[in-house]
């Protein structure tokens, strides 16, 4: 069949090339329309209870992750010149497109009792400040208001915070980059003017920085992987034509891959941004194997057409199953219910099969138009260094089998101890370098304000208007009790809730006596409540009463507690949340419903879901690849021989992660499935060549193994070098997860190369010797 396919491709090569050229032009058009994702990809399925809770919260109270914070730390902020620059800085932020409101010290208000209207009026503390004396007086008033303590300033460290709330529609579009850059420029101008360092953080900043870096890295990695491939191909084949042909094939594959992202309705995310480079890394070995077979056949036959037919007929089935195995390693992600993994799996699986089709058609077609390979292009077939290395391997395989098995066993034991040290933990920003300003600025806010990651608690009374009248006071007393418990936790900042607003209002009612910053009791609660109600001719009420209402739903049955917390990681976060939930259950009886939600919750749930999903994906990959191997070789002994050399490299990688302190998290678990799909290629190529050579040696196992090591080992080593070099490029990423994908996958592939050209033939010989039958 494969010989007929080869003849078909060569016979209709011109038509096939024209059709491919036209289709690539169409796919190039679609590729140009792909967009960058500006939303936090959903790591959990849309029917997950935690996801539904979060969406219900957003529908009722709005987004929790649209606040960007700017912090400064200095004793001189309230020197008149610095304060005036700080006020100008705030005004400039208000003029930036996309910024809806600013929460800051210059805009802070005090509640003043108006006996005439019997209302509390919000009055700016820092109104018209024209000199240092007025500033000092306003500052004394400000410090007398406990409401702002730890929210806008930390009295112990002289740290001050300003918050910019950004429009949610802007955050979901490319305009977010312009908004964030505008804020950064305004902060840089203030910093230059006052010599006071500014720190920026919050989910809008983190998400925008990550998205923009993805876009830039996608270009750099693609260029880098292409450059590496060109250098290695030139070193191997010493042919400009062969190198350009291989490069053209992977570039066409990249165009089709990016087009698939668009046609599937996806955007560029942190994972799908890796696909163009992965296509290059996987496509180049296809070219190497095909061209290597073409060259070795030409050395024997001295006939270009016959060599091309043998290239396709011999390597077609090998490369097909290798690409199927690689596609399985990626495509199993499509079976998960996580959107980000599903997108990656669907496009990766399809792209790998497309690159096979492109290689299968383009290589023989174009090579048939090129002149026959020259002697200098064939010299790599007799590389002295690699030939000597393969002879040494052959010696180990035949004469040092016990040593090979012993070393394998020792490596597995050491890896086992490493696996025992392996931890499962992830952080929202742990893929950023520890020296990155985004990371260090986040730590500034964690040190001075206990963090900026949003956590929300929704208290549902299960009664319409359950938060109205005097009966609501008892609910908010419970809310205040829970808030006090949370505020005492070192990982949490003092929560914002209606209870804090009522204490602020009571202080205003009692002439802003700081000792009155406490919850209203049944006696003064009615008076305070009356002062908070809007006038008859006032539809919206005071700004402060609006703020209070933003913490209560329209049915007046639910209220929220908003908390900013540290990025404590997936290991510590469940412990903290469990403490909060237990305390909430003690305070609120069964007549209430208490729900913990927010970005911190969805991140935790998403991390667990991705890790569990990836574990299942690796298991499915093993099963499906095993079925392919069983179909290909129809032998359980061959199946055992094929799986062991690929399980061992994954075990070694897990052990290295444990010893190196690399945690198991969404970005590192990806390594195992990716590496498995690619590493199995080596096994398939070795075993198919072994099976093809066996009849030529009259089923003599030893001679066949020896021949396979010498002939297949060369292309395996070349391909492994290409794959390793291709993945090493990811080590230059600005994301820790991408870096881990680079060096861990490279380690796995190197280990897989050694196990497949040393351990695999040893196992074949041992099983054949035991049965005294051809394997």
Image (spheres, rainbow, N blue to C red):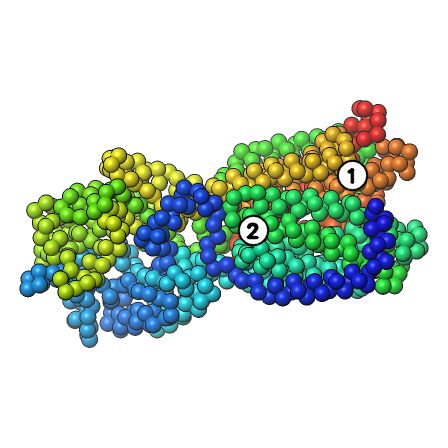
Residue 687's mark?
1
Dot 2 falls on a residue whose secondary structure is helix
Q: Foreground: 614 or 542? A: 542
Q: Quadrant of residue 85?
A: bottom left
Q: Foreground: 344 or 211? A: 344
Please provide percent x and percent y for residue 274: 59, 55
Please provide percent x and percent y for residue 388: 82, 45
| Picture residue at 82% right of the left edge, 51% below the top | 5
Residue at the bottom extreme?
A: 130
Q: Does 441 sit above or below residue 319? A: below
Please provide percent x and percent y for residue 320: 75, 47
Q: Does 335 sit above or below residue 358? A: above
| Picture residue at 82% right of the left edge, 56% below the top | 9
Residue 514 appears in the rendering: no
| Picture residue at 80% right of the left edge, 52% below the top | 290
Residue 343's mark?
2
Q: How many marks?
A: 2
Residue at the left extreme?
A: 116
On screen, residue 161 versus residue 523, left or right, reads right
- Decide which of tag 1 and tag 2 comes sooner along the chain: 2
On screen, residue 567 versus residue 721, left or right, reads left
Query: What whole-number distance in Å separates the C-alpha atoms at marks 1 and 2?
Result: 32 Å
On screen, residue 117 versus residue 452, left or right, reads left
Dot 1 falls on a residue whose secondary structure is helix
Q: Does 118 sit above or below residue 402? A: below
Tags 1 and 2 touching, CB below 8 Å: no
Q: Quadrant of residue 305?
A: bottom right
Residue 41 appears in the rendering: yes
């Amino acid at each position: 069949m494969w010989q007929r396919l080869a003849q078909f491709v060569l016979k209709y090569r011109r038509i096939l090339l024209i059709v491919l050229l036209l289709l690539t032009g169409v796919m190039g058009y679609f590729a140009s329309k792909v967009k960058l994702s500006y939303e936090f990809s959903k790591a959990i399925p849309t029917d997950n209870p935690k996801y539904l809770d979060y969406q219900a919260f957003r529908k009722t109270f709005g987004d929790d992750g649209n606040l960007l914070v700017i912090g400064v730390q200095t004793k001189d902020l309230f020197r008149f010149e610095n304060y005036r620059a700080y006020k100008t800085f705030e005004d400039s932020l208000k003029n930036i497109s996309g910024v809806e409101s600013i929460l800051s010290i210059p805009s802070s208000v005090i509640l003043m009792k108006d006996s005439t209207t019997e209302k509390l009026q919000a009055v700016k503390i820092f109104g018209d400040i024209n000199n240092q004396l007025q500033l000092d007086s306003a500052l004394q008033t400000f410090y007398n208001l406990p409401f702002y303590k730890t929210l806008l300033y930390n009295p112990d460290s002289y740290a001050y915070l300003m918050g910019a709330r950004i429009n949610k529609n802007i955050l979901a579009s490319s305009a977010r980059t312009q908004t964030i850059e505008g804020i950064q420029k305004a902060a840089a101008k203030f910093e230059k003017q006052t010599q006071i360092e500014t720190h920026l953080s919050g989910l809008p900043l983190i998400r925008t920085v990550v998205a923009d870096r993805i876009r830039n890295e996608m270009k750099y990695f693609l260029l880098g992987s292409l450059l590496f491939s060109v250098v290695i191909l030139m070193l191997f084949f010493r042919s400009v034509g062969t190198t350009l042909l291989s490069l053209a094939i992977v570039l066409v594959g990249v165009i089709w891959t990016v087009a698939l992202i668009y046609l599937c309705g996806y955007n560029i995310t942190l994972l799908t941004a890796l696909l163009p480079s992965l296509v290059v890394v996987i496509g180049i070995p296809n070219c190497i194997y095909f061209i290597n077979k073409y060259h070795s056949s030409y050395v024997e036959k001295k006939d270009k057409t016959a060599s091309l037919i043998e290239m396709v007929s011999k390597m077609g089935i090998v490369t097909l199953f290798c690409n199927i195995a690689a596609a399985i390693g990626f495509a199993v992600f499509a079976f998960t219910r996580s959107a980000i993994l599903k997108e990656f799996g669907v496009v990766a699986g399809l792209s790998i099969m497309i690159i096979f089709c492109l290689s299968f058609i383009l290589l023989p077609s174009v090579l048939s138009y090129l002149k026959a390979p020259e002697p200098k292009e064939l010299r790599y077939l007799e590389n002295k260094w690699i030939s000597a290395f393969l002879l040494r391997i052959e010696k180990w395989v035949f004469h040092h089998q016990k040593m090979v098995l012993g070393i394998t066993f020792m490596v597995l034991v050491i890896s086992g101890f490493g696996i025992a040290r392996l931890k499962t933990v992830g952080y929202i920003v742990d893929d950023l370098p520890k020296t990155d300003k985004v990371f260090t600025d986040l730590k500034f806010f964690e040190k001075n304000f206990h963090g900026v990651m949003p956590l929300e608690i929704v208290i549902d009374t299960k009664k319409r208007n359950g938060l109205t009248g005097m009966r609501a006071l008892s609910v908010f007393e419970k809310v205040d009790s829970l808030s006090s418990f949370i505020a005492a936790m070192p990982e949490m900042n003092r929560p914002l809730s209606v209870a804090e607003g009522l204490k602020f209002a009571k202080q205003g009612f009692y002439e802003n006596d700081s000792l009155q910053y406490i919850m209203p009791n049944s006696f003064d609660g009615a008076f305070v409540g009356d002062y908070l109600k809007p006038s008859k001719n006032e539809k919206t009420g005071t700004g402060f009463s609006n703020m209070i209402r933003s913490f209560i739903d329209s049915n007046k049955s639910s209220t929220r507690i908003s908390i900013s917390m540290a990025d404590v990681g997936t290991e510590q976060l469940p412990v903290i949340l469990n403490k909060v939930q237990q305390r909430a259950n003690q305070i609120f009886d069964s007549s209430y419903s208490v729900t913990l939600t927010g970005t911190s919750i969805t991140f935790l749930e998403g991390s667990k879901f991705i890790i569990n999903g990836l574990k299942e994906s690796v298991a499915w990959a093993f099963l499906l690849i095993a079925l392919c191997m069983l179909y290909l070789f129809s032998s359980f002994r061959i199946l055992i021989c094929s799986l062991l050399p690929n399980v061992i490299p994954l075990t070694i990688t897990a052990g290295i992660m444990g010893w190196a302190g690399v945690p198991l998290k969404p970005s590192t678990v990806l390594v195992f499935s990716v590496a498995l799909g690619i590493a199995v290629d080596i096994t398939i190529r070795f075993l198919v060549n072994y099976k093809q050579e066996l009849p030529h040696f009259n089923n003599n196992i030893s001679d066949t193994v020896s021949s396979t090591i010498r002939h297949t080992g060369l292309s395996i080593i070349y391909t492994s070098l290409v794959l390793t070099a291709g993945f090493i490029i990811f080590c230059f990423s600005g994301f820790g997860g991408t870096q881990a994908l680079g060096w861990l996958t490279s380690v796995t592939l190197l280990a897989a190369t050694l196990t497949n050209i040393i351990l695999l033939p040893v196992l074949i010989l041992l099983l054949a010797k035991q049965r005294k039958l051809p394997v």
